[in-house]
Image: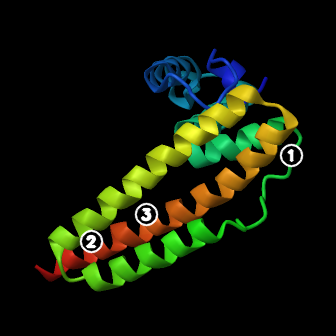
Amino acid sequence: QNHFELFGLPVGFDIDTQRLAERYRDLQRVLHPDRFSQASGTERRLSMQATMRVNEAFETLRDPLARALYLLSLKGLATEPAPPQDSDFLMDQMILREALAEARANTRALAVVRRDLQQQLTTLTRQLASCFENSGETALTEARTLVCKLQFLTKFRQDVDQAEAALEEGT
């Protein structure tokens, strides 16, 4: 079973996250090792393995980047896409990084950076969903490029989170 089948979801980038969470809770209720505390060692071990698999699948499917990488792997494509050659995208990243550097001491400026980042993430995830829906060779090649861009933006979001945390600690 792949991760989608485990949760009873259709294979695709767009998923019903509420259904994913509900199915996760259902599986945890059935498989959790606490339910097997009085069982044999083999049953406890199998419960632990099943719980670990469910946890891994849930974490993969709930995160757009991990889900995209997983979909690429299901399609037999390398999960380490080449860096984007899109000069506009790379320029946008430089501008975002400069804006973050200037905004590190200003809550409002950081909020603007986060808003701009969220707009890019939203656009990118829509494009990814479209690529995975089409699933032709050209669309999957484009999906690999978009996944790499998503990796850049995800890393940048972590940098924004750190800048916000540092600013909160300083106040």
Q: Which class describes the residues within 10 Å of circle 3: few (<14), some (14-19), or many (20+)? A: some
Q: Which residue is mark 3?
A: 157
* Mark 2 Cα shell of 10 Å, populated few (<14), some (14-19), many (≥20): few
Q: Where is residue 45 shown, x and y percent of the image?
A: 71, 34
Amino acid at pointer 3: Arg
Q: Residue at (79%, 52%) from the top-left corner?
A: 79
Pick the front one: 93 or 110? 93
What is the CA distance from the residue labelled 3 to the residue labelled 2? 12 Å
Residue 16 visible in the current orientation:
yes
Is residue 41 visible from the viewing direction of this image? no
Task: Report if the CB atoms under discs 3 and 1 are less than 8 Å apart.
Answer: no
Secondary structure of residue under mark 3: helix
Q: Quadrant of residue 80?
A: bottom right
| Front: mark 2 or 1 | 1
Q: Which residue is mark 2?
A: 165
How far, Cα to Cα, is label 2 from label 1? 37 Å
User: For this view, does 72 lie left or right of residue 165?
Assistant: right
Q: Identify residue for label 1.
A: 77
Quadrant housing the C terminus: bottom left
Q: Amino acid at mark 2?
A: Ala
The percent coordinates of residue 155 (x first, y second) are 52, 66
Q: Are marks 2 and 1 in contact (CB under 8 Å)?
A: no
